Amino acid sequence: MPELWLNYGSTDIIVDLKVENLSLIENSKFDIRSNESLDQEIESIPLPDNPTFIPLDASNSTVQIISRLVSLAGSKGIPITIESSSRTRRLLSNKIQKENIALFERNSDHLLKRTKEKSTIFISKANIDPLFGYSGTPTNLLRDFEQDKMNEAFHSRVDDLPHPGEKGAPSEIANMFCQSMEAKSIEIISNNYGINNFFYGEINQSFQSAYENLNNLSLTDQQELKSLIVGTNIDSNSSSTLSTSLDLLWNSIHVLKRNATVVIISENNKGFGSKAIEKFAYGELKLEDYKKSSYFEGLEHIMFIHELREKYNIAILSSLPRYYLKDILGFKIFSNIQVAAENILDINGKSHRISIIQDPNVAIFKKDR
């Protein structure tokens, strides 16, 4: 009986399954770059005088790239500035303790100033995304700083379902927003074990290179699964909030058969993670309200729950109160992973193979067209 470990926030949990009951989803395309290779490519980036680095997330891979950029600038005697939004600043300060991180002010004037400067370098972890198709600097800028454009993107969708790995109207709005910016960006593709690749250049150019690379890494043969256990992306600490954990679910939902059981391993020690989920949990928002509401943080999760919780058996391991998860959100609750696995086998038979993703960033799913 193989031992399989899944991350659960600050600890790991073990899944004991017979070999004949295990279908581990892995991605042989997802190679990890060596430190030497990363350093060589970082050194090829033409740093401007007095660059301003603006990380838009607090993932380990983003911190790794920033640290290398800081070292490169230091070796050349180039003074730098690091700014970050209030959403990520505290997390980054804990990880990059030797550098002072200024607040990237959440107003249009400051954003416009930075985006017009060629010395500005935004840094983002790129991934597939259920609303935009792909996430990176353009989508992060909309989410963090452009409420009107974000609202436009949300209401430009063709339907109310997740569309990970598909370009559409929301992503086009994000790209158009960044089209005339003078700033540069670095888009990073990584998983729990390291960095696969990164792309530097004009924002839309580097973002396009990133999602093209994600397409090349995608899996297209995992379809019509009857069960799926989704682990945590440690790189971006996706287990910390329900909102970030649900992104992993929506990014893999289209490989599931109707009425399939999907289990999210999600500690959620930092709570709900978005205003929309919090308002819904506290009875201040109804599921159908997304249809007539202007966009605010996490509204897409309310939409996806409305559309999908009756089509699939969504279950979760979480430290959040049972009342919110089961009675309000409508998720099934499991006390531990073994109970979840036994429940899946009871439903599908003792010879059933349970699909498990240890690192969701490795299993990048694309629809088989």
Image (cartoon, rainbow, N blue to C red):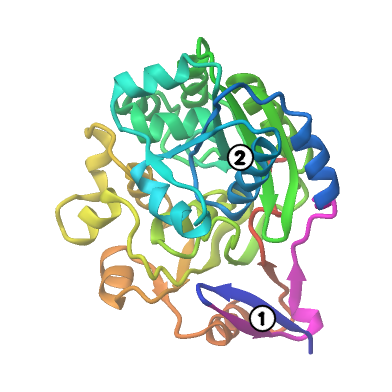
Residue at the outermost top position:
180
Residues 281 and 286: in front is 281
44 shown above or below 188: above
Query: What is the CA distance from the residue labelled 1 to the residue labelled 2?
Result: 38 Å
* Disc 1 residue type (three-letter): Gly
Where's the C terminus, which quadrant? top right
Q: In this view, does 187 lie to the left or right of 145?
A: right
304 shown above or below 202: below
Which of the labelled discs sits on residue 349, or is there none?
Answer: 1
Pointers 1 and 2 in contact (C-beta within 8 Å): no
Residue at the outermost front position:
77
Question: Which residue corresponds to the image point at 57% horizontal and 64% vertical from the top-left?
Answer: 232
In the image, residue 152 lies at what x, y percent? Answer: 35, 22
Residue at the outermost left position:
284
Question: Which residue corresponds to the image point at 81% horizontal and 82% vertical from the top-left?
Answer: 19
Question: Which residue corresponds to the image point at 78% horizontal and 29% vertical from the top-left?
Answer: 44
* Disc 2 residue type (three-letter): Ala
